[in-house]
Image (spheres, grey):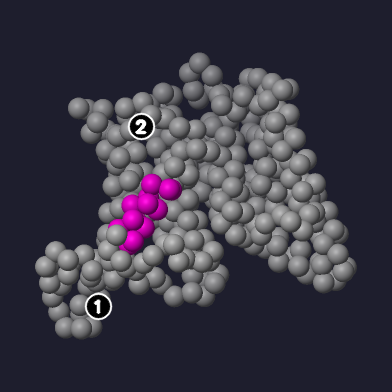
Amino acid sequence: MTSLLSGIRRGLAAGAAGTTALNAATQADMVLRARPASGAPAELVSTAADRLGVEVPGKRGERTQRLEGLGALAGTGTGLAVGAVAGVLRAAGVRLPAAIGGPVLGAAAMAATDLPLARLGVSDPRKWGAADWAADALPHLVYGVTTHAVLAAGDDADRYGAPPAPSAGSLVRATLLGAATGCRSTVGLTALALRARRTDPSPANWFASPGRRAVPVLATLGEVAGDKSAAVPDRTSPGGLAPRIVLASTAADLAAHRDRYEGGPPALVAALAAVGTAILGQRLRGVARQRFGSDLPGALIEDGVAAGLAWVGAGGVTRRSTRPGS
């Protein structure tokens, strides 16, 4: 029972952190695309209240404001509930790696939000366009990555004592890793693999084996070659941004654990940096294309920038023996 209650408490805290990150990602999208806030949460509450025969009091303006507040509270409740369930599962021994656990939690939160919308006829996801899916999927992915990182940090505290908060330098390195990943999705992990040592704490030392190190290296070489093809999908589409968010947060989390810092904040800043440079890099490539008449010069410059950012970002700190047995 104690383990169950502990899992719920930790899950609620992780869900609260994830919900804050989701809201920040949504608001950033509104700023970037100058789009209005969604009215779906308020409409969902209104429809549900009508189905249940519950009256939301107030005149028209007052009722509208209450519905908007209730819609926001419903979203917060969903984020906390998904986090609580994840905390219970983690307490029961279900532990997924960051590259899988973050997207799974994001998908769960997205399903918990979108299924009621479809079931009550408020919105039909089958009719959504790419921009609609991006506006929904990417903030939920940020939620999942953040929630998973906070839960994983709790496990580290149990095993080794609470890890120190990330230093300014570690956050800068995480930002550089994320920025590099926004340009080339696999380059951050490749830089960590090339710098990996057998004496690194697990799981960072997994890449110390030459055979394992070759996996991300080959992936990056393939990505660098394929990036020059016109058939490569838009990196700012959901299919382009989602792997960058996952791989950036995973790389930053690995680097933080290697350097014995808390992994949650670095993973979040890396994910945000990846989104920023993915958008900025695509725009700068367009400028280079107009100036040189070809995409190749801009792509080669971006290759070099991504490699430099990743190599610096993957640089570690002097090892500290803060964890027993490490």
Above or below: residue 109 compared with residue 326: below
Position of residue 232 measured from the top left corner of the image (x, y, whole percent): 71, 55
Report the residue at 74% width, 56% height from top: 231
Q: Is residue 39 left or right of residue 261?
A: left
* Residue 64: mark in rendering: 1
- Which stretch appears magenta? 106-118
Please tell me how many numbered marks the rendered image carries.
2
Identify the amino acid type marked 1: Thr
Query: In which image quadrant can residue 292 be found?
Result: bottom right
Q: Mark 2 Cα within 10 Å, few/some/many (few <14, many 20+)?
A: many
Is 149 situated left or right of 8 in this image? right
Task: Name the residue beneath numbered marker 2.
Answer: 90
Whichever of callouts 2 and 1 sits on the residue coming sooner in the sequence is: 1
Q: Nearer the viewer, residue 320 or 205?
A: 205
Question: Where residue 73 appears, x then y in whole percent?
Answer: 27, 61
| Residue in front for this viewpoint, 146 or 89 | 89
Task: Label 2, secondary structure: give it.
Answer: helix
- Which of the numbered marks, if any, corresponds to residue 237? none
